[in-house]
């Protein structure tokens, strides 16, 4: 069998110097029927390796309910990498960041007072169980057993979070005890503190950066005098958040930075080669003083766009790689226009009442109290003496629509730091709260969602709340064909369109406000006029020949009852 090890200056493959030229594809962000296509195109760009995170909360959203099938079939993904003649790098975390909800950590893990990402015993016990399950998949697929896996990463940018060496040592012990024999790595941004805090002497340090390659590699070399230099997150683009712009990087500049990196003899993992999509409710959020939820698209301005088409960056990177390594003659087909057409949408009535029974309590229950994993909870309370006044909420996580006796009053936004709203006199106060995405970075991992604290009305506590969870996917599946008049507020809409063959589509949401879209029961994700994203990617495997059904759960108002499909993506204005 083939060996893979770390030498004095290089990675060694069967004892010979070897350069890793890798690209990131997150299997959990790509439809499984499209994995093969994305891997093949990575090979065509000249990559010899595919890297992926493992998202714990995708595999085990509820404690003890482990799933490694379908979208979570990491073993099949790695087998496809091997079939393409490529190597694989696996980064199981347990924390991954990745602009993925809760940084990849399950909500059941982070929803208590345990010290996260630490050597706290109960946290380590859960992490160890998770890693063993991952390694049951990875260990038999290592290169020395005939598989593709050449490197496994310990934790992820840990130097930006903590310095608990006992934690890292235990992760290494569990990894080795589970039969992982390939070299183990860590990654941190190349600063002295992060590199010192985030690794161990027994682990191979790598860097994460997207420019000034020579300078960053020099810093990495100061902390690691021997062994191969590697940037295991070469940032070739960036992610988007709702209310921002679509981020892009200049093609020639990105190619030049890659050239500088490879000219220095370093190995690389391009983050991302193909970003994919935050389907469903899987997007994360950042909060560095202002809460910013990540968009549904994770296009990342990568060499392969959200729909798997090569971009100008693909061919520029391919030309750079060809200077340092063999590149196949085969090239991917260029993007062709998707079908453009429109399908009428018919109103199917209000949908926020189609929910599970409410839970009564003195104060509002959080999503976490309710063990609710979907996007919405509705809170209702009887107003004392049918009065109005100044409503104050300690914190809204993350966006709330306030109404009294069914009449909309206004919204409260975490992003805007809203806490106060004047409400009119009435009998019942209702507050619909959306979890817009769990923070994926730093100290806000695992924070509760919903109405936080005890709301007050003119300074007096409001008590006697009814908290009703709404599972938007289940509601979409139950939307019938009845045609009711569109009422104010949240409304369901249904439509149909016909295709001759399954194919990629781009759903234009510019005339909708905010909500969730489904095609043939497949949860495309969130849309929002707040932008920058204007189209939603519909993967071909979610469609079929013949009639296809679309369901839209609108939270505010459709400006036009039309499902418009356009020829290509529209991800918003870019930064200048």
Image (cartoon, rainbow, N blue to C red):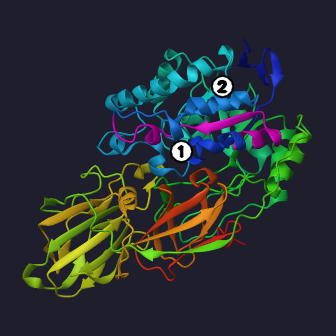
Q: Is residue 252 left or right of residue 112?
A: right
Q: Is residue 190 visible?
A: no
| Picture quadrant of residue 457 | bottom left
Instruction: From this view, report whether residue 399 is shown above or below residue 72.
Output: below
Residue 74 is one of the magenta-drawn residues: no
- At x 48%, y 58%, the residue is 285
- At x 26%, y 71%, the residue is 393
The nearer-to-camera label among 1 and 2 is 2
Q: Where does the C terminus fall, quadrant-wise?
A: bottom right
User: Crowding at label 1, few (<14), some or many (≥20) Cα neighbours within 10 Å?
Assistant: some
Extent of the magenta region: 38-63
Near-viewer residue (267 or 138): 138
- At x 68%, y 25%, the residue is 148
Residue 53 is one of the magenta-drawn residues: yes
Q: Is residue 127 left or right of residue 11?
A: left
The residue at which mark 1 appears reads as: 160
The residue at which mark 2 appears reads as: 149
Q: Secondary structure at mark 2?
A: strand
Residue 319: x and y, percent? Answer: 89, 47
Q: Secondary structure at mark 1?
A: helix
Which of disc 2 and disc 1 is earlier in sequence? 2
Near-viewer residue (428 or 174): 428
Q: Where does the N terminus fall, quadrant-wise?
A: top right
């Amino acid at each position: 069998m083939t060996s893979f090890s770390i030498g004095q200056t290089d990675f060694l493959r069967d004892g010979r110097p070897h350069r890793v030229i890798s690209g990131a594809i997150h299997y959990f962000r790509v439809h499984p029927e499209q994995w093969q296509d994305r891997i093949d195109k990575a090979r065509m760009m000249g990559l010899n390796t595919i890297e992926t995170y493992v998202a714990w909360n995708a595999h085990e959203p509820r404690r003890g309910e482990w799933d490694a099938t379908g979208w979570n079939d990491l073993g099949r993904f790695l087998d496809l990498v091997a079939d393409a003649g490529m190597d694989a790098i696996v980064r199981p975390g347990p924390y991954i960041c990745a602009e993925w909800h809760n940084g990849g950590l399950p909500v059941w893990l982070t929803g208590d007072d345990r010290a996260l990402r630490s050597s706290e015993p109960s946290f380590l016990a859960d992490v160890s169980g998770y890693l063993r399950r991952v390694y049951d998949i990875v260990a038999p697929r290592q290169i020395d057993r005939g598989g593709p896996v050449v490197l496994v990463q310990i934790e992820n940018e840990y130097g930006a979070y903590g310095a608990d060496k006992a934690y890292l040592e235990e992760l290494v012990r569990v990894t080795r005890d589970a039969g992982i024999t390939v070299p183990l790595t860590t990654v941190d941004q190349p600063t002295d503190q992060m590199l010192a805090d985030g690794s161990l002497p027994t682990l191979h340090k790598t860097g994460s950066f997207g420019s000034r390659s020579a300078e960053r590699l020099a810093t990495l070399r100061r902390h690691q005098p021997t062994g191969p230099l590697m940037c295991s997150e070469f940032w070739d683009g960036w992610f988007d958040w709702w209310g921002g712009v679509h981020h892009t990087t200049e093609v020639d500049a990105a190619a030049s930075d890659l050239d500088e990196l490879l000219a220095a003899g370093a190995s690389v993992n391009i983050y991302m080669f193909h970003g994919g999509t935050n389907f469903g409710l899987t997007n994360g959020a950042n909060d560095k003083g202002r809460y910013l939820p990540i968009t549904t698209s994770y296009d990342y301005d990568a060499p392969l766009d959200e729909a798997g088409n090569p971009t100008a960056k693909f061919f520029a990177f391919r030309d750079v790689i060809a200077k340092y390594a063999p590149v196949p003659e085969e090239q991917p087909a260029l993007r062709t226009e998707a079908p453009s057409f429109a399908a009428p949408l018919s109103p199917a009535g209000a949908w926020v009442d189609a929910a599970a029974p409410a839970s009564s309590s003195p104060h509002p229950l959080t999503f976490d109290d309710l063990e609710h994993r979907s996007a919405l909870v509705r809170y209702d309370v009887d107003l004392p003496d049918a009065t109005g006044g100044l409503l104050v909420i300690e914190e809204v996580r993350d966006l709330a629509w306030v109404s009294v006796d069914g009449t909309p009053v206004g919204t409260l936004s975490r992003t805007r730091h809203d806490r106060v709203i004047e409400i009119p006199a009435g009998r019942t106060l209702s507050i619909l709260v959306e979890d817009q995405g769990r923070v994926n970075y730093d100290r806000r991992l695992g924070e509760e969602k919903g109405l936080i604290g005890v709301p007050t009305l003119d300074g007096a506590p409001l008590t006697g709340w009814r908290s009703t969870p709404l599972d938007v996917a289940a509601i979409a599946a139950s939307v019938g064909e009845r045609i009711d008049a569109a009422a104010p507020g949240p409304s369901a809409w249904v439509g149909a369109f016909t295709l001759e063959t399954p194919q990629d589509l781009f759903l234009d949401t510019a005339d909708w406000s905010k909500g969730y879209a489904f095609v043939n029961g497949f949860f495309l994700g969130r849309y929002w006029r707040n932008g920058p994203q204007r189209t939603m990617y519909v993967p071909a495997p979610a469609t079929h020949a013949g009639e296809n059904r679309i369901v839209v759960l609108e939270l505010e108002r459709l400006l036009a009852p039309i499902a418009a499909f356009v020829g290509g993506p529209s991800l918003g204005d870019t930064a200048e």
